[in-house]
Image (cartoon, rainbow, N blue to C red):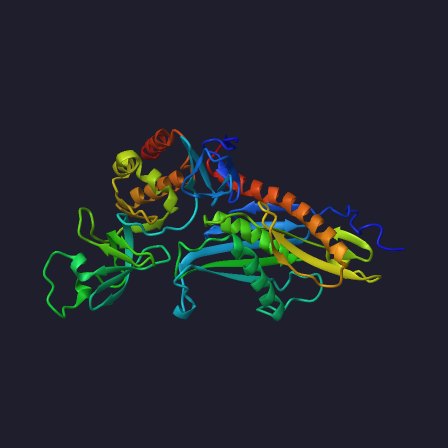
Amino acid sequence: MGYDKRIDDRKVDEYRKVEAKVGVIKRADGSAYFKIGNTWAYAAVYGPRNLYPKFLQNPEKGILRCHYNMMPFSSGGDRVRPGGSRRSKEISMVTKNSLLPVLDLSEYPNSVVDVFIELPQTEAGSRCAGITAASMALADAGLLMKDLISSVSVGRVDDKLVVDLDYYEESYPDGPVADVPLAIMPGTGEITLLQMDGEVEKDDLKKLLDLGKKACMEIYEVQKKALKERYEQKQGR
Amino acid sequence: MTNEVLVKDKDIVVPGELLAEGMGNLPGQGTYRDGEKILAARLGLVQVDGRTIKLKQLAGRYLPKTGDTIICKVFEVNFSGWRVETNSAYPAMLSLKDATSSFIQRGADLTQFYDIGDNVVCQVTNVTSQNLVDVSMKGPGLRKLAGGRIIEVNTNKVPRIIGKQGSMIQMIKEATKCNITVGQNGLVWIDGDIDGEIVAVDVIKKIEEEAHQSGLTDRIKEYLSKVKVK
């Protein structure tokens, strides 16, 4: 029979309702939130600032540190144990790797830029929401970047290829599921994050990448609007 | 070949946004060229200057630059001088010979000049490629700060707080009867009686928020006169 109709009535290439805002954390050098459905990501950027211990310093360029954290009450099921886990460490690493290609920190040798991503509630797609929020926060911090990063997850539920899986689709019981988080530079279409959980045919993966890129381009417009709104409002125009 | 500028003066652009196409335009500060295109390298305000397109920075932390007058806090005293915090990612070195013109005895206790926690107004004399910073205390207006309070503002808004030839800051000084020193690094020192200080802080925060609106000086003047009546 297959997966004919998505649980929340979305079309296959439709992502959940998104909302973005920049400048939400006053004490940070740059901040933003990005909400996609019931997944909310807040990102705060601090720096460039002094880096210790000294052996971490890179005399050629500044380094980037990312910290991904799901709040204890964020999931729909059990309480998430606070503190780092194997999972959060991996996601912090892939977040850093997906943001670094656009960042130019050569002006700031021996220093660090810290990115903190906090998730007050999650319902799948949290790493993508985190990356999207973090890229807006980095732009808000006034850092040199050649592009923003937009991110969304795509995947397969049973026999359907869909964009932005929610939690129910990720745990679909009656057929195989694959989840492919994806991040791109909207300017060039280059991919900076591509992971896969589950199995997808080669041809299907190609189709998924096209679907994902299209969704990312739409999310990029949301990011752009949020950034401009923040500064236009500041200038009272 | 087309030479098209796709943005207007004073537009706000985000990183990676297309600013112009064709080789007839030149990429200025805050932009980069990719093939035939000119793109934004950071978030900023567009300034079209003839054929050059540049971006004025709106956000971001202070980066020391030679010639800047900044407000620093001493955090270390060693044999050859002092180390100071500059409100940036990089601390600065204030060496003995740049600190004072008076004679200092060999082995003298340097804390009698500047102690840990003291705030000083100093000038950046040198910045290396590794962002090692040297500051000097020799120059007009460079001194140790005593009393008053220090507030932090966006370093990119400092020129507006000072105004043309210091017109804005002069106006605030006169209205509030405060001594005010603005550091390029976004630290502002205010000293006066308590009511004056509070008004000065309010006004400076207001300028920071409305930095890019036109007719700012007039509005601040009006605001100051209203406060004074009260």
A129 sits left or right of A67 in the view: right
B78 sits left or right of B130 in the view: left
Residue B52 visible from this viewpoint: yes
Extreme residue toward the right, this view: A1
Where the N terminus of chain A falls, by quadrant?
bottom right
Q: Position of residue A104 (x, y in %)?
A: 46, 53
**Residue visible at 30% across and 56% down in the picture:** B128
A164 sits left or right of B128 in the view: right
Q: Position of residue A56 (x, y in %)?
A: 43, 68
Q: Viewer-proximal residue, A106 or A6?
A: A106
Res A107 quadrant in image: bottom left
A57 sits left or right of A17 in the view: left
Q: Position of residue B121 (x, y in %)?
A: 24, 51
Depicted A89 relative to depicted A105: above or below:
below
Say how many tags the image has: 0
Depicted B15 relative to depicted A46: above or below:
above
Q: Position of residue A196 (x, y in %)?
A: 69, 61
Residue A123 visible from this viewpoint: no
Q: Viewer-proximal residue, A156 or B227?
A: A156
Depicted A39 relative to depicted B195: above or below:
below
Res A87 quadrant in image: bottom right
